[in-house]
Amino acid sequence: MAEAHLIIRVQAEEIYFNQEEQDKIKALREKAAKEKQEQYCEEHKYHCFRCGLKSLVEVQKGNIAIDICVNENCGAVHLDPGELETILKDSGLINNVRNSILNVFK
């Protein structure tokens, strides 16, 4: 009976330490993935999503900052999350933003 109790206790300890190791590995993988994503974002901070060139300029209009590609063959407009909704709420702002975008290409 003592042997069975000892075996069960050893198995429980093995399960516990295996779980601890798995949790540490998972945390390390999540940290590495986060760091990799942050590094990628920093390296591609001013790259246009459409043409891939490092050609974005930021145009500030009110409380909205719009990124515009100045590559003459592209001209893509990049909005951050929530900026489109903010623009659409204010119709006067739409004209201001449009004029700001067009002024970049003059």
Image: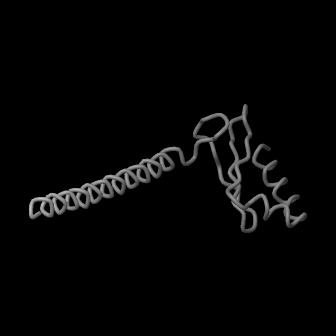
Residue 64 picture location, percent across and down: 72, 63
Q: Pick the residue in front: 12 or 24.
A: 12
Residue 81 picture location, percent across and down: 68, 58
Query: Hey, which residue is sitting farthest left in the picture?
Result: 2
Left or right, 22 with respect to 46, comes to left
Q: Which corner quadrant holds the C terminus?
A: top right
Residue 61 picture location, percent across and down: 75, 63
Q: Residue at x 22, y 61 (%)?
A: 12
Q: Residue at x 79, y 54 (%)?
A: 100
Residue 1 vertical position relative to residue 26 in the rendered view, above or below: below
Residue 103 vertical position relative to residue 95 in the rendered view, above or below: above
Q: Residue at x 84, y 53 (%)?
A: 98
Snapshot quadrant of residue 56? top right
Q: Residue at x 88, y 58 (%)?
A: 95
Query: Hey, which residue is sitting farthest top in the picture?
Result: 73
Left or right, 63 with respect to 16, comes to right
Q: How is the image coloured?
A: one colour
Q: Which corner quadrant holds the N terminus?
A: bottom left
Q: Pick the residue in front: 105 or 32.
A: 32
Left or right, 36 with respect to 76, comes to left
Q: How many marks?
A: 0
Snapshot quadrant of residue 91? bottom right
